[in-house]
Amino acid sequence: MSSQKATSVLIVDDALFMRTVLKDILSKNGYNVIGEATNGLEAIEKYQELKPDITTMDITMPELDGIEALKRIIEINNNARIIMCSAMGQQGIVMDAIKSGACDFIVKPFQPDRVLKAIEKAAAE
Amino acid sequence: MPSSNNEEYWDLFFDEVNSHLESLTQQMQALELNPSSLNIIREIFRLVHTIKGMAATIGFNSVVKLCHKMEELFDFYRQNHQPVSSQIINCQIQATDGLFKILEYISSNGEDSSVCLILAESLCQSLQKELSNLQKPQDLESKPEKTIQIKVKFAQDCQMPGVRAFLATQALEKTGLLLQSNPPKDQFLDNGNLVKDGLTAVLCSDKPLSQIKEGLFRICDVIEVELKEALPEIESQAEEISEKIQEVREIYEKECPVYIIEKLTASQKEELLKAELKIFYVDLSLIEEAKSPEDQFCNLFNNIHDYLGQILQSEPSLDSLKNRQNLPKQNIHIKTTNNKCINEILDQEIIEFNARKQRSRLQFILAIKGDHKNILDFLSDACELHKVELKEMEFIDENKISSSDNLKGINEPENHKVQAENNSPPLEDIINITKQNDIKTSFVRVSLNSLDALMNSVGELVINHNRLKLILDETPNNQLRSIIQYLNQVTTKIQQLVMGVRMVPISQVFNRFPRFIRDISRELKKDINLVLEGEETEIDRLMLDELNDILIHLIRNSMDHGLETTDERLKKGKSKQGQIKMQAHSQGNHVFITISDDGKGIDAEVVKRKALAKGLISEDEANLLSNKEIINLIFSSGFSTAETVSNLSGRGVGMDVVKSKINSLGGQITLHSVVGEGTSLKLSIPSTISIIQALIINIQDGLYTIPLSEIREIISVEKKKQIYRIGNCDLLTFAGQSIPLINLRKYLCIDESLNINDLDYIPDHCLVITINSEDKVYGLIVESLVGQQEVVIKPISQKANLKGLINGVTVFGDGRVAMILSIDQIVRFYLNNEDLRHFGDSDNNIDELSHSREIN
Amino acid sequence: MGDIVITSNQYIIFTLANETMGIPINYVREVINLNTHNLYRIPGSPNYFQGVINLRGQVIPIIDTKRKFNFGLNLGLIENPKAIIVECDKEQFGLVVDDVEEVAQIEESSIELAPGNLSISHKDRKIGRISGKDKEIKDRFVFLLSKEFLLENPDRKNSLMDKVLNEVSIN
């Protein structure tokens, strides 16, 4: 990882706490968190501005939810790699997200190794 | 037709069949865009098949006939993977139309007549023609691909295995044609636990195995992948197997009751006669995946005994059921797909299937006071019902059959068997309640009434919760506080759930339009492309029903008046194909729907001439109006711009009707048009009619609420420094902006003597709530804020709310009532400078009235 | 309750500014004492709507019946007005009346069309005959309000007033 440029990640979540937890996990493991967004609309803006390698996307957010934001980002870039962050029991929504083009999902509460694995796999694509 | 006795099920039948037909139309549309999709073909096949089954049950033979032919044609495609030609799609669409017509005829005339049969026959003929054409050239396709058996295992602690399995099938679909997966996709989508142990699949692909493997390993939680290239026969064998299974099932389903019920004893019979009970023969089976049928049946026996009536006999008997109760549960899915033992498995499957089938079947004779409906209602509540047959039995006069040595107490179901064998029309007293296993249709129908009732109750719950909170504020109590907090959580959750249930994607209406446009555009000889956007936007179901007609009207207008004919377009240098765009999105509490076309636009001059000719405005008035205002005249009643009246629009029910309808829904419509470029209509409609967060304000001792979603911010204002008067308009300067101020007192007609042109009415320090309306900012002057809370919107009679200034009313915990203001409407009145005072008074006529009375 | 409309010949008889009127009992949900309820104004409503009340959690618009009938405003204040809560076409309204007298049976045969020159008028104007309160007066006449009256479009052009005037000129 050290030889390559670090993978850039955009974190989208309306809860500051969640963003902090994710950011910690990622930056400790050599990923470059280049931005954060607190809702779907901001996510789309930031995505266009920062062009991250990977975006983590919370599902339930104000203004524009994660699913909608995902769809719009995929519209902008069909190859966007977006990992959905879901709570337990949101299987149906996650399925929708996958059908709409999300490449993977992680389930809250976050377990660092799972998060890293998902990001790693997404980065390798 | 022996259908007359079935009438009580007609509502159920038509309700369900109509929803199937709707899906069918959608699927046909989808097929047109994607004529080689096997999934769509299968779905269509399934739908037609379901309709056929239902129609056969209720005895509508023309429907059965037509469906059967449609099915046959799709079956061909289902088995020969080739794209469906557009000619055949057309043919099928016609047939679907025919189905609609036949069913409509039946439902309005109450019978399946020869007219229907003739229509069905003629459609069948054209379908048959297509079918024979297809069957002639049996070109054999070569298959360069290999068939691969795949086994995927997921980690033990895998989260949402269903989604993982879906990702896996998705990855496989990228590399080739996924022939089958076990468990099947629709099952694990529903129940992720099915794939806890892994997933097996058969894939047809020309890609190297390593690539497929790699793709699977890229999915998280995939810990093991096994790929095996299968013998080429496996595919056909797999198909064969599934067909054979299907065949067995079908045979079984068709089979008539084999069980013959013992004769009733003389004393039993006498008792029944005395009690005036009706006797029913009931043959029911549970859904395939029903858990422990014996338990269910035992419960059923108990419940029937308690609530319904008396079971005279049954097969199996209650005792044997009780004994069988503890049998080990059988597993439903085939676990291995080893090539060699495939036939064994198949046999096993059939045996198991039969055993299961037998286990989930119960026949009994029931004596009750009620009728069919009682039994059906009861049964469908009491167990996981798949299918039930009911037959009422009659006592036979013994004297008449005295020659028979077997004195039959009742007319036994053997007759019923004979009838079926004779291929006679389906029995009158049979109804199938088929539960759909398909995930797409795994929903329960809820009547709007009960949803409304539920919503109302939730509203009451919220009101009472707020009352409790009020008590808490007066007498603080920690124990109570924690209870109320918990109550709050639960209430919120229920609220969300109920609201969620009411919300449906707008696609339910949007999806009807591709078909609609397709048909009409042919008729009009205009080439029209429809673009749909934001179909997933959710809207209250009630709203949706209301929207349908409005949208049809607007789209018709666009097609008829908006878009030019192809020739006209080419002459103007436009693209040959006209475009209509339907967009939907939601924002705050509103759903916005835009319908735009790239047609000729609305010419203000033409509108003006029309309005003058129709006497809607005078010459003087016309000269004062801006172009935009003139164009808006099309919303006034009695206006229609069509030069020629076509059979689609321009029939006099014009935009005024549309507008008042939208207003009555609490929505608005605005129009924007550029001559030569097109017209766009924007509808804004409240997405729901129930519970909102609102700011409560006080104006002259009256309480009013403003939906929080409408509010930008609240500013504390010092009059001298920040408010200026220009003409008769007060402006607030804030953050470099000039914001027009609206005096709510005037528009809420609170103070009739108030001179609103006097700056003095504004206190030296006041609060201004800024709001957005049609992209402009306005400020509302408010005396004081009372608070913010969740309020339940109760509708108010249209007759009392003629000007639409309020969106409804709400009741607070302490019983006080507050109006929920319609900000957009208030702004509109402000802009029109309309004086609402004395509205509705018969002015000075009161005096005249007494005068006229005197004369008389 | 309310789903099944039973046609009966029973009417609630009430008084309004010295007139006696009747309304079919089918439409009537209850009669309330208006003084015990707070009235809340409805902005933008026609003036004959006095406002709404909160009747056990239900919000019900109250119609100032005299104003709606154009009876004039100077008929004096009624000390203890009642409101008849009626339901038609799934909406509930309260009709303010001076007093409620009785429930009376009026047979179809004793109902006739009202003459045009009476003080109130609506499409379906009918009067019925009921037995008098006192023994001396055998019969008296009451105006019977119909459902159409309650649903009438309050648009000024079609207002009761105009109709009255029209009829006056015709007569």
Image (spheres, rainbow, N blue to C red):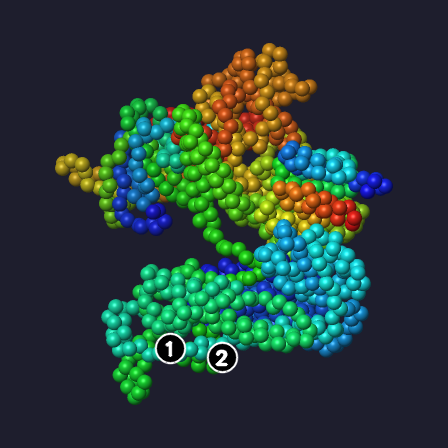
Specify the label residue B599 is tagged with. none
Q: CA distance from mark 2 to mark 1?
A: 23 Å
Left or right: where does residue A72 sit relative to residue B478? Answer: right
* Label 2: which secondary element: loop
* Residue at 65% over, 19% down: B734
Farthest top residue? B720
* Residue at 45% over, 37% down: B487
Q: How crowded is the residue under tag 1: few (<14 C-alpha within 10 Å), some, or many (20+)?
A: some
Regarding residue A71, the answer to whether it shows in the image is no
Regarding residue B79, the answer to whether it shows in the image is yes
On the image, the x and y values in percent for residue B334 come to 61, 68
The residue singled out by tag 1 in the image is B261
On the image, the x and y values in percent for residue B110 come to 45, 65
A23 relative to B527, above or below:
above
Query: Where, by quadrant of the figure, is residue B430 drawn?
Result: bottom left
* Residue at 41% over, 44% down: C90
Looking at the rendered structure, the kind of residue marked 1 is Ile
Please give the chain letter of the residue carrying mark 1: B
Left or right: where does residue B599 sit relative to residue B426? Answer: right
Front label number (2 vs 1): 1
Please give the chain letter of the residue carrying mark 2: B
N-terminal of the pair, mark 2 or mark 1, is 1
C160 relative to B327, above or below:
above
Between residues C58 and B840, which one lies in front from this camera angle?
C58
The residue singled out by tag 2 in the image is B423
User: How many numbered marks appear?
Assistant: 2
Between residues B261 and B133, which one lies in front from this camera angle?
B261
Q: How crowded is the residue under tag 2: few (<14 C-alpha within 10 Å), some, or many (20+)?
A: few
B498 relative to C99, above or below:
below
